[in-house]
Image (tube, rainbow, N blue to C red):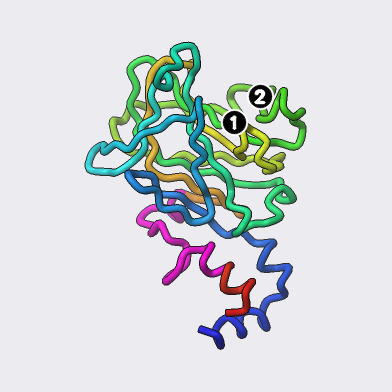
Amino acid sequence: MRYAIGTLLILLPLGALWAEWGILSIELGKENKSNGIIEKPQADGFTEPAEVEGRECRYVPEVPPNLPNVGNHIYFSVDRSVVPDKEKTHELWIAVEFFDSAKKAQGLILDYDNKGDIYPQQAFALDLPLEKKLIPFENTGEWRIAIKHIEDAEFKDQGNNADFRFHIHPYKTEGFYIARVWVGDREIKEEDLIGRQPVCCPYESLPEVWGRVKSGR
């Protein structure tokens, strides 16, 4: 292992290691499998484990427990132990796998920490047109992957201590289910994700690999 890491450092400048994200991921369930993305539970970010069509996932209820006047979200951040300079990468692709079935809602909204935000009043890209943030439901009754391309990201954990979140549209109409989320600094296509294992590296998770690189092990 010592030789392999040493070879990696010789072939690639250290700056290149930090500059390239690849595709980070998180698989959600009873125990989340985080590989560069972290869920950030909080008051309006309450989620609970669930299983739909044989898939483990997280359920985001219509409103958080004991907070009937607040809508619910699921929050995520890119792990700084994997991408320490994440706020410097503005063009990103975010993909989400969700259960595509709704009774009242039109779709999901992606809010994200962007370059034009004013902290803390507008910590997410709240002024963007709806069509840039909306992931419409098609009511297929199946798990479906949607991909959003953003060009003005500035991930500094400013949105309630997170980089991005999903919530239902219209607000507080019903709950929803999410199984996996990906973030990449290159174009993500659905065929890249179908059948993709939750661990990005063959034998170790990304944080473990970066930890070994930084410590010289």
Q: In the picture shown, does residue 161 fall above or below 185?
A: above
- Residue 212 quadrant: bottom right
Q: Position of residue 148 (x, y in %)?
A: 56, 39
Q: Which mark is residue 60?
A: none
Q: Give the residue at the far left of this rendering.
A: 54
Q: Position of residue 78 (x, y in %)?
A: 58, 49
Name the residue at 61% across, 58% down.
81
Q: Position of residue 206 (x, y in %)?
A: 52, 63
Q: Amino acid at mark 2?
A: Leu
Query: Given contact means CB atoms under 8 Å apart, are the residues at marks 1 and 2 in contact?
Result: yes
Which range of residues does the magenta coloring cover? 190-210
Q: Dot 2: few (<14), some (14–19), or many (≥20) neighbours within 10 Å?
A: some
**In the visual, does 174 lie left or right of 187?**
left
Q: Nearer the viewer, residue 80 or 152?
A: 80
Residue 193 among magenta residues: yes
Residue 158 among magenta residues: no
Q: Amino acid at mark 1?
A: Asp
Q: Give the residue at the far bottom of this rendering.
A: 3
**In the visual, does 138 lie left or right of 69?**
left
- For the C terminus, the image quarter is bottom right
Q: In the picture shown, does residue 157 fall above or below 217?
A: above
The answer for how far apart the CA atoms under marks 1 and 2 are is 7 Å
Q: Position of residue 14 (x, y in %)?
A: 71, 72
Q: How many marks?
A: 2
Q: Dot 1: few (<14), some (14–19), or many (≥20) neighbours within 10 Å?
A: many
Q: Nearer the viewer, residue 10 or 145?
A: 10
Of the image marks 1 and 2, the number of the one nearer the N terminus? 1
The residue carrying mark 1 is 111
Q: Which mark is residue 126?
A: 2
Name the residue at 72% across, 23% down.
121
Name the residue at 27% across, 43% down.
55
Q: Nearer the viewer, residue 41 or 86?
A: 41
